[in-house]
Amino acid sequence: MRLAIQIPCFNERLDLPQTLSDLPRRLDGVDEIVVIIIDDGSSDGTSVVAESCGAHYIVRFPRNRGLAVAYSAGMETCYRLGADLVVNTDADNQYCAADIEKLIEPVISGRADLVVGDRQTCCIEHFSWTKKLLQSWGTRLVRRASGVRINDATSGFRALNRRAASIQFVHNRFSYTLETLIHAGVSGLAVESVPVRVNPPTRASRLFSSLPQYLRRSVPIIVRSYLTYWPGRTFCWLGLAFAVFGGAGIAKFAGHYLLNPNYNGHIQSLQLGVGSLTIAFLCALLAVLGDLLAVNRRLLEAALERIRDYDARELRLWEIGCGETRAGVYRTFAEPWLSTCGRTELMVVPAEHAAVEI
């Protein structure tokens, strides 16, 4: 079994050496381990540091495109490299790398397609009470929207099998964590949480500068994802609410009219009722159209899954030589970590083999 550890990076030359050094070189049930660095337009030489510290493959963007795009590119690369198992972790060494063994165990045993590391945020000392509250609220919201049992929705410490990696689709540019969980619920993936440890923070988050900014960008992602995958259900409930409101308004007018036909009051109730019923009818039409579009989206995703499989078999990225680039993926001179060879030390390559921009 081949394990690919992908690490999205943006100006991480200071923290990346420790992150790579902590990665396990030997895991039960894994024959080969490769590390893929996705350099999201870094300007501090992150790719050079990654290669000198023993990363095996590097994908470099010429400019910053965002965490969600970097994650998707890394997942695509892992699939093209023939990985049977994928682990995603952060470059700032937030997660304890020794827990990768716990993270992949449910996938290797066949119990889960996707495993999310539970940081147990309520116990993290450097999290403020506001952040803990929002984490808990957000996880409950994603749990209801996705239908999967999850304890830490925003955790990026994840393990996926090959099937789960092949159907990962992220449509926003901010973050992959929430949308992929909702998609996993729609796709019927088996999702599991395992408790993991976190390391002391080394820097502030680069994904967002404040909690209000994070909420402003995350809440629309949850709403849009829910509308994307369950449009019929959403517009049906919305239409039902307008229908009840409109029916109540018309009933109020009709009741007063029957009691006293000469009294022409409460005309506003009739107007609001008719307007609400019109909106309810439009919502019903949107529910039908949305459901048809959702069916078409599922067909497109099934087609894209087949295309990905064909693309991976044709490209055969696992066969590219050291120092070569194919399909935007650069292979360094570091050899994969083989479990059958025992625990290996971190390989340092000569400076003249520094990573080139792809």
Image: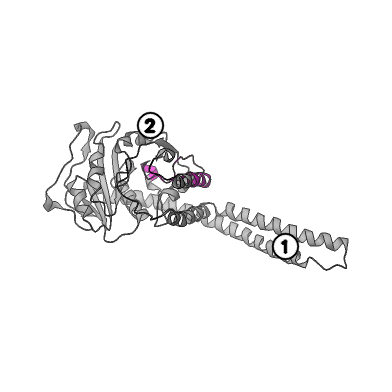
Magenta residues (range): 135-164
Residue depicted at 68% across the width and 62% down the height: 276
Residue depicted at 70% across the width and 55% down the height: 244
From the image, state whether disc 2 or disc 1 is nearer to you.
Answer: 1
**Residue 198 in sight from this viewpoint:** yes
**Residue 118 in sight from this viewpoint:** no
Check disc 2 and give the amino acid type. Ser
Q: Quadrant of the N terminus?
A: top left
Tell me the element at label 1: helix
- Separation of marks 2 and 1 at Cα, in angstroms: 57 Å
Check disc 1 and give the amino acid type. Gly
Residue depicted at 32% across the width and 34% down the height: 101
Give the residue number, with chain letter if any, for mark 2.
109
Q: Quadrant of the C terminus?
A: bottom left
Front residue of 94/186: it is: 94
Q: Is residue 317 above or below residue 26?
A: below
How many residues crowd around disc 1 within 10 Å: few (fewer than 14), some, or many (20 or more)? many
| Earlier-in-chain disc, 2 versus 1 | 2
Q: Give x and y (percent) for residue 114.
A: 41, 40
Q: Give x and y (percent) for residue 215.
A: 46, 54
How many residues crowd around disc 2 within 10 Å: few (fewer than 14), some, or many (20 or more)? few
Relative to residue 330, is residue 189 drawn left or right?
right
Q: Give x and y (percent) for residue 237.
A: 62, 53
Tell me the element at label 2: loop
Kindly identify which numbered label has been placed on residue 273. Answer: 1
Quarter-of-image position of residue 261: bottom right
